[in-house]
Structure formats: C-alpha cells, structure tokens
Image (cartoon, helix red, strand yellow):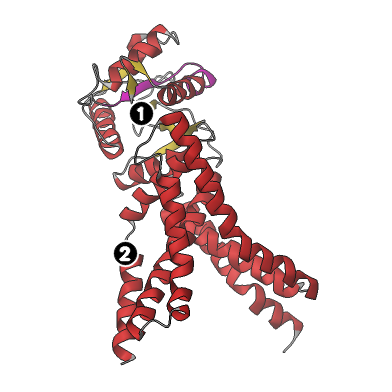
Amino acid sequence: MTDWWQTALLYGPAVFFGLLLVVSVIQEPRRFRNAVWLALFVLCFSSALLLDFWRDWAFIPIVLVAAFTPVIVVGFLLINTVIVIRHEGFSLSTVLPALFALVMMVCVAVYPMTFYFNAPRWGKSLGLLIALEGLWFFFTFAALLLYSAIYRFLPRRRQYDYIVILGAGLQGTKPTPLLRGRIDKAVDLWNRQGRRGLFIVSGGQGADEEISEAEAMKRYLVEQRGVPAGNIIKEDQSTTTLENLRNCKVIMDERCASNDYVSAQNRMACPYRVAVVTSDYHVFRASEYAREIGLKSDGIGSHTKSYYWPAAFIREFIAISKAHFWPYLAIAALWAAGMILGR
C-alpha cells in the first residue's frame, strides 16, 4: 500500500467528522450533535497523529494519563463539592459534583469487578451494560464541555433588536449576584451597540419570592444601571427556561405583527434579531431551546464564579442528556439483542 493511501486511511475519519462538524455548524450551531462531531474529530485526529508519529517512549505517558485522569477528576469533584457546600449550603445541586464522581467510579469499576468476584454470566453482562452506558455518558459530557466553550466564542457581530435576560432567583426583592451578572452583561452589550434595542426581562414570581424576577430585573436596570423604563419589557409569567423563551418569542412576534417597534434605522425589526443573555454554563442549553421553538438568537454568557461552575455545568448536562436520551435506549437495545443472540 502506498504512503498516500496509508495517510488517507489514517486521517480519513478525522476529515470525515471534521467536515460533518463544519457543515452542521454552518447549518445550525445550536445542535447537540455538533458537540459529538467535534469530540469524534478530536479523538480521530489525535489518534491519527499518535499512530503517525508513534515512538516507543510515548507509551509511558499515555498509560499514566489513562490511569490517573479518572483519579484526578474524581478528586477534583470531591474537593469542589466541599467548596461549593461551604459557599452555597447543602442541597442536591451543591452535591452534584460528588454524585457525578460516584457515578464515574461505578462506571469505571463495575465491569472489571464482575470478573474479579467471578460473577455469573448475567452479572458480567449487566456490568458491561453499565460500562457502555457510562462510556457514552462521559464521552458526551466531555464533548459538550468542549463545544460549549467554543460555542460561546463563535463570532457574533450583530445589532440586536431585543436583548432577552433570563431570570436566576432573587434575594428578597433584589437580584442574586448570579442574576446581577446576567443583567450587567446585557447592559454592556446594549452600550456596545449604541444603547439601541429593547430589553426583555423574563422570569415569574416563585412561591417564596416577594416580587417577580422580571420586576426585580427592571428595577435594577432603571435604578442601578440608568436604563430608561421605556426600553424594558417585562415577561413575568414563566417558571422555566423553555417558558422564558416561548413567552418572550410571543411578545416579539406580537410586536412585529402589530408594527409596534421600529428600529433606529427607521425600519421594522421583522425579522428581529435577538440576544439571549444568561450565565456562561447555561448558554448552550438556552440556545438549544431557542432553536427548538424557532427563535433565531445568539446566546451571550455572563461570568460564573469558578467554584460554582462545575456543579452548574453538571446540572446543565443532565438536563441536556434527558432531552437527548435515545442513545442510551439504543445502547440498551443493542445489549439486549446481544444477550438474546448469545444464548
């Protein structure tokens, strides 16, 4: 076989997944599959480089990385759990890193342990299923972590007609520090585009809240950031991110249909341009929801405190995984088929 064919076979998978990624991102950057294509491209390309430039000494660092990465990750998650609980108190969301670490340990150890304890055939098979499901779980977690970071930095040079701010809880009648970060990020964007466009503050009133999140955000914009009240629209009925976006889209569609908003260039903002401002860990899920309801928008992320980021991103990943659950069912179906055929 010629060197040309060897190179083509070696790098062909990376080129294939790279092209899939480019085409998919051009068509719609807010798709979960983009994260999968990116991870497969990185995996295939790095494997091709390793095989192409393999040296005997490279075996040692590869083995060390493979052996110690799970240990380092688990240790980091456990330490992070302690730090988050100290800052935020004990709750299900703050212990998520520790639970994530526990799941990782189970997925890594359960299949080898079935052989160590000489488990029956059905036990080994069940251990294999857990390992396969865990492999997809952690592969997609790494994929989404990588793509989310890249997605936030995709070029966005637009003049937005609407800047939607998603709610994030209150302290009495004041926005939480997390929500203030979102509001300040939105105001920075508004200032950069010459203080043009309208804000839509989105968030209802929870059972333990004195006022709606939308009202608290409006007060903060007017009193603390000097935004004219006439530049702010309230959406105060939603309780989830999906409701936030659906209700905001209804408002924008109705204004567009009624010719109620004319942009600074004296033209109708139809179709309108939208920026959805949320916390950086939440950008991709909010953008994916926006795509699902047909809202053309760009996700803009505000900074999140580093100690809180892992727990917040794990929560986001779990929510996204629930919306893309079919691969887990497919893995279980293939496992069941193998069990039946292997009898």
Q: What residue is at 46 percent from the left and 49 percent from the top?
A: 29
Residue that numbered label 1 is attached to: 168
Q: Which amino acid does label 1 sit on?
A: Ala
Count how many numbered circles sit on residues in the image: 2
Vertical position of residue 207 compared to residue 74: above or below: above
Front residue of this view, candidates 59 and 178: 59
Residue pictured at 53% horizontal, 53% vertical: 74
Where is residue 57? Give x, y as percent.
79, 71
| Magenta stretch bounds | 189-203
Q: Where is residue 47 in the image (x, y as percent from the top left)?
A: 65, 70
Q: Does the magenta stretch include residue 117?
A: no
On the rendered structure, is 302 left or right of 8?
A: left
Query: Image quadrant for the C terminus?
Result: bottom left
**Which image quarter holds the N terminus?**
bottom right
**Can residue 30 be seen in this snapshot?**
no
Tell me the quarter of the picture where residue 287 sits.
top left
Measured as percent of width and height from the top left, residue 199 is found at 37, 21
**Residue at the image point whose x is 26% and y is 23% from the top:** 259
Q: Residues within 10 Å of mark 2 (few under 14, many from 20)?
A: few
**Quadrant in the picture for residue 126:** bottom left
Q: Return the mark for residue 10.
A: none
**Mark 2 to mark 1 CA distance (whole Å):** 30 Å
Name the residue carrying label 2: 326
Name the mark nearer the viewer: 2 or 1.
1
Residue drawn 40% across the image and 24% down it = 179
> Is-magenta flag for residue 199?
yes
Q: Is tag 2's residue or tag 1's residue first in the polypeptide sequence?
A: 1
- Tag 2, which secondary structure? helix
- Picture coordinates of residue 42, whole percent (x, y): 60, 61
